[in-house]
Amino acid sequence: MKYHSISLTIAMTIMLTALSSCDKTHDQVIEFLTQLQTAHQNGDKEMIAQLYPAAADADSLVIKFDPKTVKIRPDSGDTMTVDLDDGTDLVLVWQATGSLQAVASHGLFAYPAACQDLAQKTGQYKPSLNDVENAQRMADTLFSTWMQSKIDEKLNSLVKITNSSVSKKHISDQWTATENDKCYYTVTVANNTDHEIGGNDYTISVKELWDEWTDGWEDGSSKDSIRPKSASKILTGKPIPANGTVNYAWERTFEGTHHSGSTNYRLQSTLNYTPNHTISSLYDFTGNEYEEYLTTKNK
């Protein structure tokens, strides 16, 4: 009986020691997470660099945890993985000083919702990659330009200017001091999609061009000459119903004398899209756009 009593005592001692060790580790992990959370809230990049060097330059972090539900998974050696409530995890390593330091994470680095949504649709952001790997991909601003050109190309076949016209009205071919020449400009935009396009989703850049002629400029610089003239304006977008069109119309009045006038009226117009969720949703993403971009980039 004495032998069994000693064995039981030893077993209980080992169990209590293990539980005590687990509690201590848990407390240290919670202390580490709290320090990292506080450092981020205070914008203390120096402290963040000590706790998690790779996160020092991160634009934003999401650190949410409940001390009661934090799970610790021992890895090899002095390494452990800490799972938080929101699916975020951190890989922590014991330092020689007895303190903890994060060396990797998943889901801790945060990005604007619209930015991350587009990045996930294109495969630029992958949940399977760690935060540092995703941060490097997200910092590739050239991809945004490349991707927007792909979206614009698609949209140009769906939402486009179908008519830009100029008509003019003047009293006679010869200008007089009392005659005005009016030009009427028209731009039509068609929406060939099954979605309404909002007025905030686009604008139209318009450049009016004409030639101004005279049989003698007032400054005496030349006679019987023509000077090209232009005027630019931005037309605010209007909502376009699904499979519908909208028209823009305005006029310009030119004043002339028997010495001068304007002719050869023409118009240049360009549709400008605002990259937002509504517009981007019209593009059918494959999820391989970023890999396609890397292929073209490395050629």
Image (cartoon, rainbow, N blue to C red):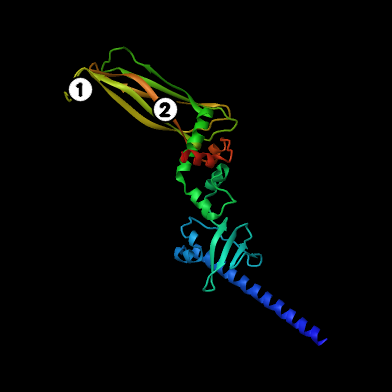
Residue 285 in percent (x, y) is at 58, 38
Give the farthest residue toward the front.
Answer: 3
At 50% from the left and 36% from the top, the residue drawn is 201
Q: Earlier in the sequence, mark 2 or mark 1?
A: 1
Q: Residues within 10 Å of mark 2 (few under 14, many from 20)?
A: some
The vertical placement of 20 against 265, above or below, is: below
Q: Which residue is mark 1?
A: 217
Quadrant including the N terminus: bottom right
Considering depth in this image, is 46 or 280 the residue closer to the camera? 46
Give the SS element for disc 2: strand
Q: Which residue is mark 2?
A: 269
Q: Is residue 255 visible?
A: no
Give the SS element for disc 1: loop
At 52% from the left and 72% from the top, the residue drawn is 96
**Quadrant location of residue 284?**
top right
The vertical placement of 8 against 194, above or below, is: below
Considering depth in this image, is 93 or 182 the residue closer to the camera? 93
At 36% from the left and 26% from the top, the residue drawn is 208
Give the farthest residue toward the bottom.
Answer: 2
**Quadrant location of residue 226?**
top left
Residue 112 in percent (x, y) is at 52, 50
